[in-house]
Amino acid sequence: MPSAFPRPQRPTGVIRTLPYFGSADDKHDREAMTRAYIRMMRSFNAMEAGSAECVYVAFPQKPTIEVLHCYLIVGGKVRVRANISHWISGEQMGEVQCWDNSTRNAKWWAVLTAPVSWPPEHILRRGFQGFRYTEELW
């Protein structure tokens, strides 16, 4: 007998909100965030063009479900998707200089690789800490 409840789909990706983007009150902070956003976009454009091999994104923990895609939320919008090649522990990686010129020690680093994909339309999402599983968004 078929179930009355729809079968949940297995997630194909994770969504991560980048912590240093958001609304800043002072002009200096807004300028710094704009520079960080431009650096991030240049990194993904370079990876898309084949002139950069990968991008590292900090995660507080490694997902327990293996997924292919990582979507990034910046400023309340899903901005980009890339493939997760593999994971590197923070102990192995050490400190990494980030797009906002800070250095971070993360518990885990997702190694993102091409293909890079951009949303066909704006996908609004509220930011959150950590990550969330998701089905394919586009």
Image (cartoon, rainbow, N blue to C red):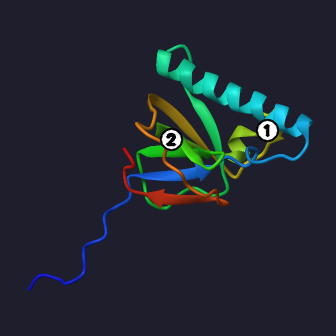
User: Residue at left 49%, top 43%?
Assistant: 122
- Would you name the residue on which mark 1 appears? 95
User: Residue at left 70%, top 25%?
Assistant: 39
The quarter in which the C terminus is drawn is top left
User: Residue at left 87%, top 39%?
Assistant: 29
- Would you name the residue on which mark 2 appears? 86
Q: Amino acid at mark 1?
A: Glu
Q: Secondary structure at mark 2?
A: strand
Q: Is residue 101 above or below residue 21?
A: above
Asked if residue 99 can be seen in this view, the reply is no
> Local crowd at mark 1 within 10 Å, few (<14), some, or many (≥20)?
few
In the image: residue 29, left or right of residue 122: right
Q: Position of residue 90 (x, y in %)?
A: 70, 46
In the image: residue 83, left or right of residue 73: left
Q: Between residue 74 and residue 18, name the one nearer to us.
A: 74
Q: Between residue 53 and residue 28, name the one nearer to us.
A: 28
Q: Are marks 2 and 1 in contact (CB under 8 Å)?
A: no
Q: Position of residue 65 (x, y in %)?
A: 44, 60
The image quadrant of residue 33 is: top right
User: Residue at left 54%, top 13%?
Assistant: 51
The quarter in which the N terminus is drawn is bottom left
Q: Between residue 63 and residue 15, name the one nearer to us.
A: 15
Q: Which mark is residue 83?
A: none
Q: Position of residue 115 (x, y in %)?
A: 42, 29
In the image: residue 39, left or right of residue 33: left
Q: Secondary structure at mark 1?
A: loop
Q: Between residue 134 and residue 119, name the one nearer to us.
A: 119
For this orientation, the residue located farthest to the left is 1
Q: Earlier in the sequence, mark 2 or mark 1?
A: 2
**How far apart are the two marked residues, 2 and 1, measured between alpha carbons?**
18 Å
Q: Amino acid at mark 2?
A: His
